[in-house]
Amino acid sequence: MARKLRREEDKTIGLVPTMGALHEGHLSLVREARRMCDVVVVSVFVNPAQFGPGEDFARYPRDLTNDTTKLSDYNVDYIFAPPVEEIYPKGFSTYVSVDGLSEPLEGAARPGHFRGVATVLTVLFNSIRPDFAFFGQKDAQQTLVVRRLVRDLAFDIEVVVLPTVREQSGLALSSRNAYLSAEDRRAAAVLYRALSQAREVYMEGERSPKRLAETVRAQIESEPRARLEYVGVADAETMEKLDRVHEDRPVLIALAAHFGGTRLIDNIILQPARPKSRATGRLASPGEG
Ligand code: AMP
């Protein structure tokens, strides 16, 4: 569909892949796609291949009517919401695995998850042929997996990653927040408080991944409604486990935690402070992801 448009009119195509139940996090990607591209395609597909047995595939929130209403403010050109058999026809048997990057943290917690993600994105990229594809930093490891997929399989696509959109409380927006009770939603703000506290101790000079992780763990364990599944500290570009945080490389702190029956993930990236700028004499402050 969109491919034909581009061939005829040489337009740039931006793809925003989502699983629907759209919120401001998704819409921030759509806005940027609209700003950068001539044609904007939003895919809405709850991808069975990225859910493990016992996960929430069946009950994942689906509301295409509401999603379409939300997107109507953004002048989106196409909403691509295929049925499962269109992406995975009978006899489908080809899967894409991004080794290495997919293995730690979220990959270890959800075996097969990134294989499902890489496979569906390959199908979407080949069907839609976007020039740009938009992803959120909220899924930090996914952004690395996607960049590697695009590079290794020679997709002619620029991957654009945008910051995590948060509620005032710091809670990262997520379609799964809809599952939370009012109390759990309040309690879940502890995740970003914990990550922010790790950033503070990092800025005070802490370079031990173990102690950074312990800072996060201690904060989360102080919230009785939270059950921490993992917190990990890794190189933000290679996902390698670190013995020590390097002064010149960004570091990712990523976690998953449960509130009642709801599993949430969050992360921050700690950027090494840039050297003193001669022009202003000020120190650049470490950024956040
Ligand atoms: P999902 O529908 O959860 O698969 O997410 C679709 C895209 O939206 C992914 O690239 C996510 O990283 C991104 N996304 C989800 N939540 C947020 C958020 N709070 N801020 C920014 N991007 C997000």
Image: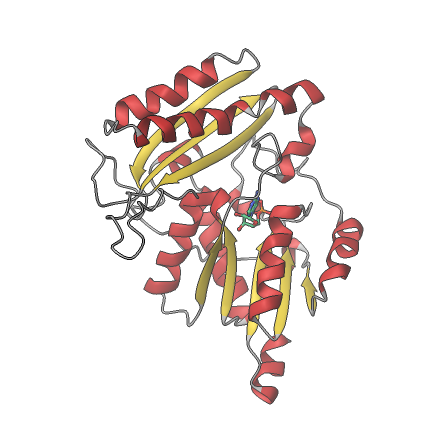
For image coordinates 59% across by 20% down, the residue present is 187
Q: Is residue 89 visible?
A: no
- Res 235 → quadrant: top left
Q: Is residue 149 visible?
A: yes
Tell whether 154 sits left or right of 33.
Answer: left
The one nearer the camera, 135 or 99, is: 135
How many badges with numbers are in the image?
0
Above or below residue 17? Residue 269 is: above
Residue 246 pos. (x, y %): 20, 39
Q: Which part of the image, by quadrant, shows the N terminus?
A: bottom right
Residue 56 pos. (x, y %): 61, 34
Tell whether 258 sits left or right of 217.
Answer: right
For image coordinates 37% across by 28% down, the residue present is 200
Applied colour scheme: secondary structure
Above or below residue 83? Residue 37 is: below
For image coordinates 57% across by 14% down, the residue present is 225
- Res 80 → quadrant: bottom right
Residue 9 pos. (x, y %): 60, 87
**Residue occupying the far bottom of the picture:** 8
Tell whether 14 sits left or right of 96.
Answer: right
Tell whether 181 sits left or right of 51.
Answer: right
Residue 261 pos. (x, y %): 61, 22
Q: Which part of the image, by quadrant, shows the C terminus?
A: top left
